[in-house]
Amino acid sequence: MAIDARRRQKAAEKRKKREKSVKVAKAKARAMNEGVGMEAVLARAGEFPIVECVISKGWEERGLAHILLARKLPNERLLVGGWYVDTLCLGIKDAAVLPGIEPADYESRIKPEIFHDKVEFEPCEPELALKITSGAADFADKIGFRPNKRWGESRHLFAGLEP
């Protein structure tokens, strides 16, 4: 009888351990799918494929650029980074990270009016977007202007890219 009780106890412990590991795996997957755990998503941003990178038309002449970079999450939603950049002086004027955006919302709501401006975009290489944003932030910092407070987290969207 004692042997049967030990076997049952071992089997129960094994089952609990297996159930716990399944729960942890499901919680991680849920966090990624629901857009929860922004830090974890941003830390893995470089793993997600880039769907689109665009910049406002005429940015070189004006010295002001709106930039959008969209990456596809495992749940088919988008992780979007947006930057409003003054390339001549102030650097990163505004920055945003938008996790878990539906592709339709991105096209109809985010892209046309990012930072409350009506903007026409043209395709842009992600490396150029990185070069513009980081260059503007560095230049502005040298002359005493700090980048927008969200620049630190938004720059994670450029993970895996070289300027």
Image: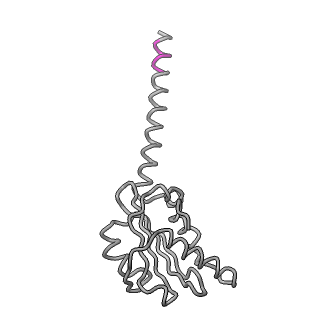
Characterize the magenta stretch by its predominant secondary structure.
Answer: helix
Q: How many marks?
A: 0
Residue depicted at x 50% and y 58%: 46
Q: Position of residue 101 (x, y in %)?
A: 37, 66
Task: Give residue 37's position: percent from left, percent from top.
Answer: 49, 58
State the extent of the magenta-drawn residues as a range: 4-9
Q: Can you say which quadrant of the picture contains the C terminus? A: bottom right
Q: Is residue 58 left or right of residue 131?
A: left
Give the residue furthest to the bottom: 62
Q: Between 154 and 26, which is closer to the camera in this rendering?
A: 154
Residue at image coords 39%, 74%: 123
Residue at x 46%, y 25% (from the top left corner): 12
- Left-right relation of 28 to 106: right
Q: Residue at x 53, y 61 (%)?
A: 159
Does 31 sit above or below residue 92?
A: above
8 to the left or right of 39: left
The picture places residue 51, in percent across and down from the top left corner, at 38, 64
Indicate whether 6 appears above or below 29.
above
Question: In the image, is residue 77 part of the stretch drawn in magenta?
Answer: no
Write down the quadrant of residue 53 in the picture. bottom left
Instruction: Find residue 68 and report its horizontal and vertical position in percent.
Output: 44, 73
Residue 16 against residue 128 in the figure, above or below: above
Q: How is the image coloured?
A: one colour
Q: Is residue 80 above or below residue 112?
A: above
